[in-house]
Amino acid sequence: MRKTMRVLGLVLLLASAAIGGSAARADDYPTRKITLVVPYPPGGGVDAMARVMAQKLSEAFHQQVIVENRGGAGGTVGTRFVARAAPDGYTLLLGHTGTISINPSLYPKLDIDPRKDFAPIGLVASMPVALLANPSFPAKTVADVIAMAKKEPGKLNLGTSAMGTGGYMCAELFKSEADIKVAVIPYKGTAPVMTDLLGGQVPMAFGVLPPALGNLKAGTLRAIAVTSKKRFSLLPDVPTFDESGMPGFEAVLHYGLLAPYGTPAPIVDKLSAAVRKAVDDPEVQKRIHFEGGDPLTSTPAEYAADIDKEEKKWGGLVHKLGLKVE
């Protein structure tokens, strides 16, 4: 009996020490620089969001938050790096829908489970995709596009960025939900899609908005509809798919911060509070708008629920289409 009580006492003592240690780490955190990993090369939307957040978190914590670009294999290299990092709050990931909700199904060898390998911190922004068209393209609405596609199945060309990206998956979701046959043409990146769209080599394309905003304002491109549930703040006159005869259609890219699974909850909560405060800053909101997004905040639990929902949606579509990258 005494031996049992001693063992129980030791267990309770160790548990108390662990809890106390976590609290102490959270109180002191951070005591050194934090690395915010971007799983893509510099210059893209994920990189831009990361640099906005790194600056504000550096100011909030009075510690340097550096952005480290670890591109490669469609974002899987940097994502895996963070998933395998020490769960101490000093290595974070700027994740987005592609890396967290699409890639785990698209890359079967990735061996990443977004629910089990990460501790969600909070959402930062959302970015809609738009169905863009060359001004000479006769279809003016989503209904027009669907009617043209059904009249001549397989003859309409629809450009996107590379297979598995948000633009590509939006195109496949559109085909599936509208029950139409169009030829989806994936390009190696956003720039060549825009070039061919402007030149009329492809009549329409799904793409994120930042690279297209200048041409949309100049009238050299036209936006038929956006994929968000609400109209995009910078294009208030462009309708949503939901308003255009496809109720419930939504395909929005979400950006958020994540830590490796096992990061102490007090540290996650401290980071989450700092992220929410940063995104509520008018200066940050202005910068997010400039990058083509809308500010979006959440608690860790809300971000976890969002990841679960988005992974089921996009992972299900990947499996339905039989998409796979070895």
Image: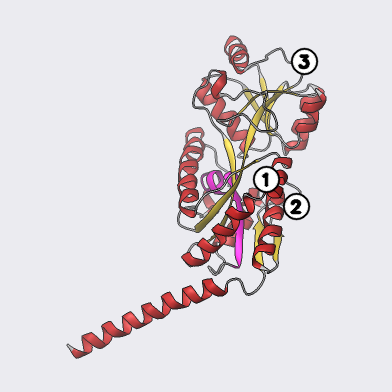
Q: Cα distance, mark 2 to mark 3? A: 34 Å
State the residue position of label 1. Answer: 285
Q: Which mark is residue 136?
A: 3
Residue depth check, mark 3 versus mark 1: number of the one nearer the observer? 1
**Between disc 1 and disc 2, whose residue precedes?**
2
Residue in front for this viewpoint, 39 or 321? 39
State the residue position of label 2. Answer: 42
The residue sitting at the left extreme is 1
Query: Cβ–Cβ below 8 Å for labels 1 and 2?
Result: no
Q: Which mark is residue 90?
A: none
Task: Name the kind of residue labelled 1 in the image.
Answer: Gln
Residue 275 is left or right of residue 21, and the answer is right
Residue 175 vs 307, above or below: the answer is above
User: Measured from the top left, where is residue 4 in percent x and y?
Assistant: 22, 85
Which residues fall within the magenta stretch?
Answer: 90-106
User: Measured from the top left, where is residue 109 in percent x and y?
Assistant: 53, 52
Residue under the image location 77 percent in, 23 percent down:
201
Residue 10 vs 119, above or below: the answer is below
Magenta segment includes 166 = no
Q: Secondary structure at mark 3?
A: loop
Q: Cα distance, mark 3 to mark 1? A: 35 Å
**Between disc 2 and disc 3, whose residue precedes?**
2
Residue under the image location 38 percent in, 78 percent down:
16
Residue in front for this viewpoint, 161 or 34? 34
